[in-house]
Image: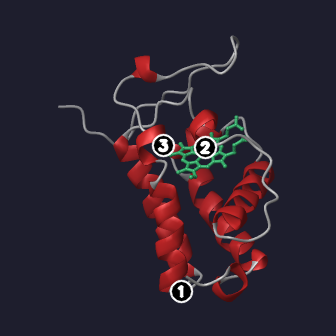
């Protein structure tokens, strides 16, 4: 497996992550989950996290993705949507096949810890934390 420096660079990851969160923030559904979070902050956390996970310098000091998403109602469909926007971003920046595969594999490893079937599976990390639950606005009501 390629070492981090042979695989990619921090500046390339920053560019991909910027494109990714542009898509996330402007999306009518997943964007709602980020309404209270400054975009530069989440971009910086995401870059640090991915650099570390891909074998680069370990600068990430935030929560583990499992804990960070405890209080968010994230369905399989929402998780798939995030993955789709990520893949589009990687492809727009002409990322290598290997980088795409390794990035998606890391994210996929968290799927079963982050995705919930029902709202009762959400857990607040602290008493005043709000549970984030937004229905898919694109879903047809029949
Ligand atoms: C549909 C799926 C996802 C949604 C809606 C989502 C949403 C969010 C939101 C709103 C935050 C900000 C939390 C806060 O600061 O209060 C966050 C943080 C974060 N997310 Fe996600 N996320 C998803 C999936 C993932 C995945 C798959 C990963 C990586 C494996 C990931 C990695 C992170 C990291 C590293 C943070 C920063 C944690 C911290 O604040 O310390 N997320 N996410």
Mark 3 vs 1, N-terminal side: 3
- Residue designated by label 3: 29
Per the model, the C-alpha gap separating discs 2 and 3 is: 20 Å
Q: In which quarter of the image is residue 70?
A: top right
Provide the secondary structure element on which disc 3 rests. loop
* Between 33 and 5, the one nearer to me in the picture: 5
Provide the secondary structure element on which disc 1 rests. loop
Residue 78 in view (yes/no):
yes
- Residue designated by label 2: 65
Mark 2 vs 3, N-terminal side: 3
Q: In which quarter of the image is residue 34?
A: top right
Query: Closer to us: mark 2 or mark 3?
Result: 2
Asked if labels 2 and 1 touch by Cβ distance under 8 angstroms, the answer is no
In the picture, measured across the screen, residue 94 lies left or right of residue 4, that is left
Asked if labels 3 and 2 touch by Cβ distance under 8 angstroms, the answer is no
Per the model, the C-alpha gap separating discs 3 and 1 is: 29 Å
- For the C terminus, which image quadrant? top left
Residue 73 lies, in percent from the top left, at 47, 30
- Residue designated by label 1: 96
Give the vertical position of 85 relative to 35 (above or below): below
Residue 68 lies, in percent from the top left, at 64, 36
Asked if labels 1 and 3 touch by Cβ distance under 8 angstroms, the answer is no
Q: In percent of the image, x 70 and y 13: which residue is there?
A: 128
* Between 52 and 121, the one nearer to me in the picture: 52
Q: In percent of the image, x 69 and y 73: which residue is there?
A: 13
Q: Does the residue labelled 2 lie within 8 Å of ligand 1?
A: yes
Residue 97 lies, in percent from the top left, at 47, 84
In the picture, measured across the screen, residue 116 lies left or right of residue 63, that is left
- For the N terminus, which image quadrant? bottom right
Q: In percent of the image, x 64 and y 60: which residue is there?
A: 22
Q: Name, please, the residue furthest toward the left.
A: 142
Q: Name, please, the residue furthest toward the front.
A: 1
């Amino acid at each position: 497996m390629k070492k981090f420096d042979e695989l990619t660079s921090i500046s390339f990851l920053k560019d991909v992550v910027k494109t990714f969160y542009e898509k996330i923030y402007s999306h009518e559904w997943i964007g709602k989950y980020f309404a209270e979070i400054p975009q530069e902050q989440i971009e910086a956390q995401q870059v640090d996290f991915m650099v570390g996970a891909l074998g680069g310098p370990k600068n990430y000091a935030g929560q583990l993705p499992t804990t960070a998403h405890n209080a968010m109602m994230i369905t399989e469909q929402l998780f798939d949507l995030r993955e789709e926007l990520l893949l589009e971003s990687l492809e727009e920046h002409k990322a290598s096949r290997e980088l795409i595969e390794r990035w998606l594999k890391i994210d996929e490893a968290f799927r079963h810890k982050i995705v919930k079937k029902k709202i009762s599976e959400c857990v607040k990390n602290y008493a005043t934390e709000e549970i984030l639950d937004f229905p898919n606005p694109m879903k047809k009501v029949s």
